[in-house]
Image (cartoon, helix red, strand yellow):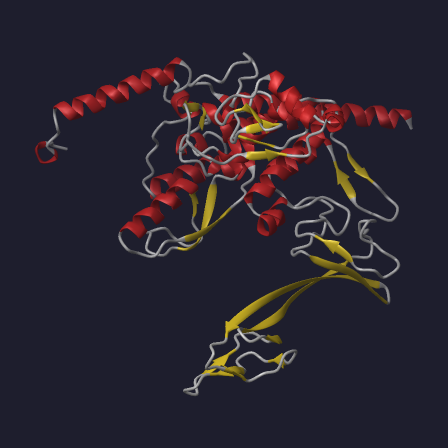
Amino acid sequence: ISTHGTRKGLADTALRTADSGYLTRRLVDVAQDVIVREEDCGTTNGIWVRDISPERARNEPIFEKIAGRVAAEDITIGGKVLVATGTSITDDNARQIIAAGVAVKVRSILVCEAREGVCRTCYGRNLATGKIVEIGEAVGVIAAQSIGEPGTQLTMRTFHTGGVAGVDITQGLPRVEELFEARIPKGKAIIAEIDGELEIIRQEGSRKVRVTSKEEFEVSYPLDTKMQAAVKNGDDVMEGQEIARDAKGNATRTRHAGKAHVTTKEISVRTLDEEVREYAIPHQVRIRPELDRRDGQKVLIKAGQQITEGSISPQELLHILGKEAVQTFLVDEVQKVYRSQGVDINDKHIEVIVRQMMRKVRVDSAGDTGLLPGEIVSQWEYEEGNARALAEGGEPATAQTVLLGLIKAALNTTSWLSAASFQETTRVLTEAAISGKVDRLRGLKENVIIGKLIPAGTGLDYYKKQREQAARILEEEPIDLETLSV
C-alpha cells in the first residue's frame, strides 16, 4: 500500500508541474494586454464588501479586500466621513472599517470601464510598492504569474466521496482549471432558477423537486362619479371581463384575472401570478440537508441557490443571476482552492483574469447596427454600434454577456498575432486573412513578435509621445488623399 501511495505521489508531482506551467501560459495569453493606461475611467460603479466584522476578519482576508482600494462611495462611521469618494483606503482606515463593521463600496477591476487595459483608480494599490499603481504597469502579466506560480503547490487529486453522494469532488489544480476554462463541473449541482417555495415529491424510487413562485400584485381601475361598478366586492373576475360602465355605456375591462376589491373611488383586482419549475433528482445525488425536510414542510429558496450537493456551473449562474454574481462566484471559488492549500493570493489578480473572460457579448438580434446575430464582439463594439444606430434613428442590437474560458478568450482577442502565437495557428491566420484583420499592436506579445518596444513602462510614454507628434503633424499639414499615389 505504501509503495502505491509513493508512486502515485511522484506521478502527481510530475504531472502537476506540466499542468501548472500550461495554466500559467494560458493566463499570460489572456491578460498580456492588460496594462494600466489611464488615470481614471470615470465609472461610478463598484463592488460591495459586506458582512464585515472583526470575527469574520480573523478567518477571512477582509483586510486585503478593502485596504489599498479606492472608495466608490463615501465611507461614513458614526455620521463622520472616514474615506471620501475617489480616495484610497489606507491600512488604518481598513482597520477602523473592520472594527465598525460597515459595508463599503470600492472600485474594482471588474467594473473598470477603460477601453484598453485598466485605470489606476480601479486597480488601486500596487502590492509590490504599497503605492497606487503607476501608469504603464503590466498588471495582466503580474496577475497571471501570481496565480500560476503557486499552482505547483496545489494538489492534483480528485477525491471520490463514495457512499451515498457518488460524486467526484474536483479539488486543487483541476478545480482551478475547471473554473478558469468555464467548464461544466464534474458533479454539477442543480440550482433553482426562480425564488419561491421548494417541496420534494417522492414517488416509487424517484424524487422530484418543485419550486413554486407566487407573486401577488394589484391593478387599480379608478371609478368616476358617473361610473357604475359591474362587480361586487370579493367577486372573482376573469381576464377581459367588464368591471364598470360609464354613463355613455363605455365598459372598463380588467386586464388580469383575480379577486375584485370595490370601493367608491376605485376597483382593484388582486392577481396571484404563479410560476412552477420542476427538477428530477438522479438516484445517487444528495439534496442539500437544509432543504431536505422529512416533515413535508415547504422551504423558501432563492434563485441561484443550490438544491443538490456538488459544484455550481458558472454558465448556469450567468443565465440565472447575471454578470456580477458570476464574477463574484469565480473569484471566491478560485480563492477557496488556493486558501485550502494555505496559498495567499490577492483578489485583484483573479479579478484581472475574470474581467478578461467576461469582456465579450453574443449578439442576439442585430437591429440596424451591422453586427451579425450570433457574433461574439467586445462590449465596446456593441455599445458603439448601438450608439451609432440610435443616433441615426435606427433600431439598437440586443446581446448578452458570454463567459469564455481562458483558451477561447485568448483566441478571441483583437490581436491576431497574439492569438496565432498561442494556439491553433493555422486556423487563426486563415480567419484573419479571410476577414482582412488589422493588428493595432496594442499588447505586449505582438510587439515582442515583430521586435518593437513594448507598450508598457517607459514604452507607454514613448508611444504616447509618438501619437501626439503624429497628431501635431496632421494638424499642421492636412494630407490630401487624392494626391497620394498608392
- Closer to the camera in the image, 485 or 475: 475
Q: Residue at x 60, y 29 (%)?
A: 23
Q: Residue at x 46, y 27 (%)?
A: 34
Count of numbered marks: 0
Task: Identify whether 381 is placed above or below 275.
Answer: above
Q: Residue at x 68, y 29 (%)?
A: 101
Q: Position of residue 13 (x, y in %)?
A: 74, 23
Among the 4 quarters of the image, the one containing residue 18 = top right
- Closer to the camera in the image, 260 or 296: 260
In the image, taking residue 102 as reference, residue 247 lies left or right, namely: left
Q: Position of residue 80 (x, y in %)?
A: 57, 25
The quarter of the picture where the N terminus appears is top right
Residue 345 visible? The answer is no
Q: Position of residue 98 (x, y in %)?
A: 67, 25
Q: Residue at x 81, y 28 (%)?
A: 8
Q: Residue furthest right?
A: 1
The quarter of the picture where the C terminus appears is top left
